[in-house]
Amino acid sequence: MATEAVASHIDSAKHDAVKEYYGKTLSKTEDLATNSCITGKAPPAYIREILKLIHPTTLAKYYGCGLCLPDYDLTGAHVLDLGCGAGRDVYIASTLVGPTGRVVGVDMTQEQLDSAREQQAYHAGTFGYQNTEFVQGYLEKLAEIPELQLGSFDLIISNCVLNLCTDKQAVLKACYDLLKPGGELYFSDVYANRRVPEVLQKDELLWGECLSGALYWNDFVRMSQRAGFCDPRLVEDVPITIGNKKVLQIFDDAGQGLLRFSSATYRLMKVEELEQDSEDYGQAVMYKGSIPRAPSAWRLDKHHVLETGRIMSVCGNTWRMIKANQRLAPHFYFFGSFDCHFGLKNKRNGGLSFDAIAAPATGS
């Protein structure tokens, strides 16, 4: 894979600690010390049905904080899962893309990949086809993985892994390069209401629990924009409460008891024409109600629920996002052009709120 040179920094000590934590310390979900790497809400019904088909060992080794699969038809799609672990999300995606699709999982931890590969034959027999591949590599060095080709993926997913990366900017830039035009990075991760100090980033337990590597959400927005994803869209977010007394004491001892964390799902679309603000061109879209499992309305993000049959005024970015995605565009009518600019439609509102009801790390 050839791509623009990006200086990627790998902190070997942190990587070794993560490998040890997820390869040897943890053997199942229940071994986690906090709930930061545990999905906070039940998945939708169609995902629950798929989970019944997944091998129990794969389910037991799941560490994730959200549902990182967009809700539209993925038949035939090429999907990349970053930090795939034992492969739960890879196998869910396998059923959604079908026999004409392809799902590649990348992880740096050998024990996790061994577990994922051990269940390939089981899932191929259950699904009736084999469309998965597991590759070892560092997410900071995606450009060096020969199995990954530029512009070859419709969708990149990741579940609570970006926070574990030591060069998050390099990961985001590589994702942009790997996506097809109109494709998207759709992923869940942990974010903080302020920048986590270095003293906490050095704590191996906090790093392994996906807390001390969490990005301040506004830094994440800026990183995404520098990588080429000009308009990150927040899909949903859930406050994380931490009940482990040992972990809480570490925060308090560092004078950081008011650090707050949230599990959030973002979608970042590769559309070159996107602007950094919501500009108004007098455009509108109307949802046809034809996306599977969404007959009444379809949610683009936290602030855009598109109701069937209703003409909805949208900014130029929203219009372009839907239009550029070949899996979404057929389900919408598009009105207007870019001939006349009416100024700013609304201020950017894509970050996490961290409302007063969101509990701080100490739970106080």
Image (cartoon, helix red, strand yellow):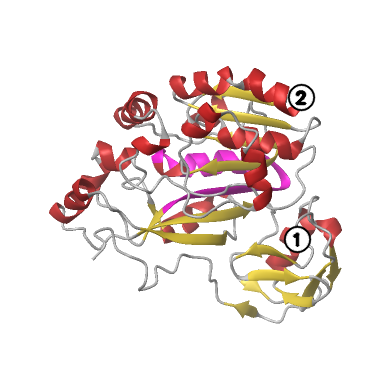
Residue 202, visible in the rendered structure? yes
> Is residue 99 part of the magenta span, yes or no?
no
Quadrant of residue 292 within the rendered picture: bottom right
Q: Nearer the viewer, residue 77 or 98?
A: 98
- Expressed as whole percent of the image width and height from the top left, the position of residue 40 reads 46, 54
The residue lying toward the viewer, choosing from 133 and 314, is: 133
Task: Identify the image quadrant of the N terminus.
Answer: top right
Q: Which mark is residue 153?
A: none
Q: Position of residue 306 (x, y in %)?
A: 73, 69
Query: Compared to 129, does 71 lie above or below?
Result: below
Magenta-drawn stretch contains 174:
yes
Q: Which mark is residue 294?
A: 1
Return the x and y of residue 319 as percentages of the image width and height. Answer: 75, 66
Q: Position of residue 325 (x, y in %)?
A: 76, 52
Instruction: Tell me the amino acid under the disc marked 1.
Output: Ala
Q: What amino acid does circle 2 point to?
A: Tyr
Please identify the quadrant where the C terminus is shown. Answer: bottom left
Relative to 88, 355 lies left or right = left
Label 1: which secondary element: loop
Say which residue label 2 marks: 129
User: Marks 1 and 2, how far apart in space?
Assistant: 27 Å
Residue 146 appears in the figure: no
Left or right of residue 123, residue 325 in this image: right
Residue at 57% across / 38% down in the picture? Answer: 174
The image quarter in which residue 287 lies: bottom right
For residue 114, above or below residue 202: above
Q: Residue at x 17, y 51 (%)?
A: 249
- Please, what secondary structure does the residue beneath circle 2 have? loop
Mark 2 neighbour density, 10 Å: few (under 14) some (14–19) many (20 or more):
some
User: What's the magenta region?
Assistant: 164-190
